[in-house]
Amino acid sequence: MMPLLAHALAAARRRAAMAWLLGGLPPLALLAWLGLRADGGRGTLLALAVALPLLAFLAWRAWRIRDPAWAARRLDRRPDMEDSADLLLMPPARPSPLQSLQAQRLAERLRAQPPELREPWPWRALLTSLAGTALCTLAVLHWPAADTGAAATPAPTAEDVEAAATALLLSETELRVMPPAYTGLPAEVAPELSRRVPAGSRLTWRLRLRPQPESLRLRWHDGRELALRREGEDWLGETTIERSGLYRLVAGHALPLAADRLHRIDVVADRPPEIRAIAPERTLSLREDGQRHWRLAFEASDDHGLGQARLHITLAQGSGEQVSVSERQIAVRGEGDTRARRYVHRLDLAALGLAQGDDLIVRLEVADNRRPAPQWSRSASFVLRWPPPPAAEATGMEGLIERALPAYFRSQRQIIIDTEALIAQRGRLRRDSFVSRSDAIGVDQRLLRLRYGQFMGEEDEGWDAEARSGDHEGGHQEEEHPAGDGHDHGEGETAPLGGAVSALEEFGHTHDDAEAATLLDPETRALLRQALNAMWSSESELRRGQPEQALPHAYRALDFIKQVQQASRIYLARVGLELPPVDESRRLTGKREGIASRRHAMAPAQSVGGPTPALWQALDGGDPTQPLQDFARWLGGRAGDDTETLDLMEAIEALRADPDCDDCRERLRRRLWPLLPAPAPAAQARPAPDAAGEAWLRALTEDGTP
């Protein structure tokens, strides 16, 4: 853009912005004056804060829209520009020779006759703004002043206010909560009369009513009352709260309270400390060889702070009924802040006197800092057991026991180890030797399957001594009972020691017992059934000489067995023998008081639940006035500080205040639902017979059958 044109555009911009500023200053001055007159300065600042940015925005907008394109449009109004003023705005490198020639001609014409882009002053708009501002100023100055006659009227006295009042009004309310010092919580002051406070807090009420009553007290839902004392214009009262409750204001005045409703104080009880064990991870640990120390680690937390902590150690020595128990306590110190701490301690087993066959039982006890009496929490008991030495067998039985017992008590894990070892030795063994060893492992798998199958009430498949020698040709053969054998497994047959037929099964005949099959819960039985199926598949593959295909089934069986073992495992600490005393006065007396007779007829069910069912039915579209009174009287006789009781009282109060409130009825019905008694069991009538049944009964009657 040539300098001459740029200078003309700048002059046009300045005039447009100045026109907006001159037109907006008079109304802005009027607004500032009105604000200053209204409240002495605050209104002025507010008016300036709103009007000045608006006026500046309008001036900037007038400046902004007058760009070079606007200047080209203004120049095109001149005939000598030949509607080609935009050529003056094009960059020098872009125009063609013809465009450059035309631009030079236009530039020469502008030098001969300088451009004028400024718009005329908007005198009409400026005069209108000034005149409107002046008229508004005159109207404000001549506005009639406020009626001063009211100032001459004397202020009403307290007696006049009391005579004109129709109800007592709470003009100011304040409830101050001072939590117990041990909580470390700050005091709170709020105008709400319903609060949620810690247990043991000190509550202070400050109330102001208009007109003043003769007395004022707080009446709680359980009948307790707290009288408030008057100090000047305020009523004060304070108490220490220990349990939740509902209360209302009761004033000694002829006028009722305008807001006569229940207020609620919910007390948050101090929770006891929470303890989490980190080490050991199991409740029962076995002492390892060479172990001299036992590391214990716990974490504890509390809502208001932890106090002292101690380890309770019990050493149980002996076995059977000759168990001696010694106890001691060790104070421990944790690491961390007052709300969360970590306790780590190492026990010296030799110093405690732990010996072979003993149990060391440890638990952590942690207290909080509640006053006056702290709360103690106790962790679970953890047992460190020193396994007793293996029992010695009688002389002369070593060979027999060594040959039979390991085969019977072979574990699933050992079967997996043997199978993997056999797979690793496949290349170094002959085919017949490899198949023989695989079959032997399959026999061990079969014995283990039979052992676990006894818990499912399965029939014993018997035991053949030749099966252990590996002379059979693979595959699983089921032994069947001969018909009419009385299920006695033959006469004169004996099983080797450690075989599948134990002494209890041989003489007691307990296998396939339905009662024994129900000793496990359904979930555990399902897991055990899956383990037996996996063992069956593993045994089948092993007996065929294919240990690679048997290994996945063996692992599945081990996994199911571990789940069964952990399903109902409970470890109990050993304690001394403490039998309850025997009441000799009740023995051999022959008295039968309190024993119900089985010959009495069926008695009708008694209605229970008090007035709850009647109120439940009345709330469903009926008139609940009388049932509501009966229920409120019944609830007041058993009033407590639990949340459910307080919710019921609030719902009753809301329905009394507005009997036509459908939402209040529905809310009360939801509160009553848990209190409704369960339906009494009743004898079911025999179903009516169908056509076939009637024909049968009719045939019996015709045949003379009674």
Image (spheres, grey):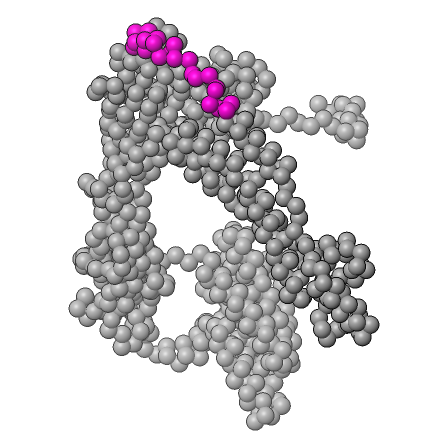
> Which residue shows up at 34% across the image and 21% down it?
171
Left or right of 84, for residue 526: left
Left or right of 529, for residue 366: left
Residue 55 lies, with reference to residue 460, above or below; the image says above
Left or right of 50, for residue 233: left
Q: Position of residue 49 (x, y in %)?
A: 47, 41
> Which residue shows up at 67% across the image and 62% down it?
5
Front in this rendered view, residue 205 or 325: 205
Q: Which residues are magenta?
A: 138-160
Front in this rendered view, residue 633 or 157: 157
The answer to whether residue 381 is seen in the rendering is no
141 inside magenta stretch: yes
| Among the 4 quarters of the image, the one containing residue 581 | top left
57 inside magenta stretch: no
Total count of labels: 0
Q: Position of residue 433 (x, y in %)?
A: 58, 89
The answer to whether residue 147 is seen in the rendering is yes
Task: Pick the quarter of the image with the N terminus.
Answer: bottom right
Q: Position of residue 342 (x, y in %)?
A: 28, 60
Task: Pick the quarter of the image with the C terminus.
Answer: top right
Front in this rendered view, residue 650 or 40: 40
> Which residue shows up at 28% across the image and 26% down it?
205
